[in-house]
Image (spheres, rainbow, N blue to C red):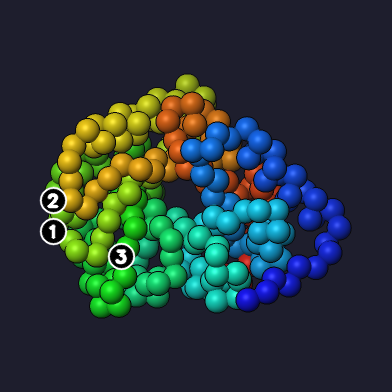
């Protein structure tokens, strides 16, 4: 499928410059995911033309609509809270699901992906700050989830993800360190379906500290595309 790149003047340059500026300071072992939620197709095309291949969406409908239109070598990351009734739409379309947050969701992913013979690559989302308004499991719930993951045939956990509480640099560093400790602890254990390859943490305002504390995947939206447009993109969600 070809890309419909149009000349958008300054917008092209801003997005391209933002990507280049971020990547310039990243080591080769850190993956940049451009968070394209609510962003229109033309913005993603500009980022793609600038060499970006990993894009993050938090609405299932928006991801599958964009996946159908855009280049097939794009790696789509689902980074939002995933409802069990939407899992089936992601089969064969998503590169990595960042938001495994319950045993119920795990079992649904296993069921839907096994029907089509696909492997679901997952990150366990940990609610490291125990915030009521955020998804993710608590640290003390990890063992129960891990036991269920080990019973699966079509679910492979590749690492961990967290959205930390808003705070200053010192507070951010505290939560990033906690995540790295959990990541390192799991890395020392042997599992059938779990490997610690990816530690997804850090966004536009805190990604530099996250990398210092061990993150190897950062999720940046505003820092690439500018302020989020609530009514932008392909959906109003």
Taking the image as drawn, is residue 226 in sight? yes
Q: How many marks?
A: 3
Rendered residue at 15%/54% (across/down):
150
Q: Where on the picture, by quarter, is residue 154? A: bottom left
Q: Mark 1 points at which residue?
A: 151
Residue 71: horizontal and vertical position, in percent?
60, 69
Dot 1 surroundings within 10 Å: few (below 14), some, or many (20 or more)? few
> Mark 3 or mark 1, which is nearer the start of the sequence?
3
Q: What element carries label 2?
A: helix
**Marks 3 and 2: which is nearer the front?**
3
Determine whether, in the image, residue 3 is placed left or right of residue 101.
right
* Up/down of 24 relative to 112, above or below: above
Residue sitting at 17 percent across and 41 percent down?
Answer: 190
Q: Position of residue 138 (x, y in %)?
A: 26, 42
Disc number at residue 119?
3
Which residue lies under the disc numbered 2? 147
């Amino acid at each position: 499928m070809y890309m419909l790149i149009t000349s958008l003047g300054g917008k092209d340059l801003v997005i391209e410059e933002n990507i280049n500026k971020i990547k310039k300071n990243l080591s080769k072992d850190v993956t940049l995911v451009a968070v394209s939620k609510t962003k229109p197709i033309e913005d993603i095309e500009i980022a793609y033309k600038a060499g970006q291949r990993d894009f993050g969406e938090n609405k299932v409908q928006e991801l599958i609509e964009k996946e159908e239109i855009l280049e097939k070598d794009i790696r789509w990351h689902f980074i939002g809270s995933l409802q069990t009734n939407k899992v089936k739409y992601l089969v064969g379309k998503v590169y990595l699901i960042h938001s495994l947050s319950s045993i119920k969701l795990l079992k649904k992913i296993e069921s839907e992906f096994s029907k089509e013979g696909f492997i679901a690559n997952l990150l366990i989302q940990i609610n490291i700050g125990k915030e009521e308004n955020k998804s993710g499991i608590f640290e003390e719930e990890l063992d129960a989830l891990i036991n269920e993951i080990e019973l699966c045939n079509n679910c492979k956990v590749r690492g961990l993800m967290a959205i930390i509480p808003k705070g200053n640099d010192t507070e951010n560093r505290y939560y990033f360190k906690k995540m790295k400790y959990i990541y390192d602890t799991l890395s020392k254990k042997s599992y059938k379906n779990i490997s610690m390859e990816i530690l997804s943490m850090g966004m536009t305002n805190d990604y530099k500290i996250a990398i210092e504390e061990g993150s190897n995947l950062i999720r940046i939206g505003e820092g690439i595309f500018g302020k989020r447009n609530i009514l932008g993109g392909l959906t109003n969600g």
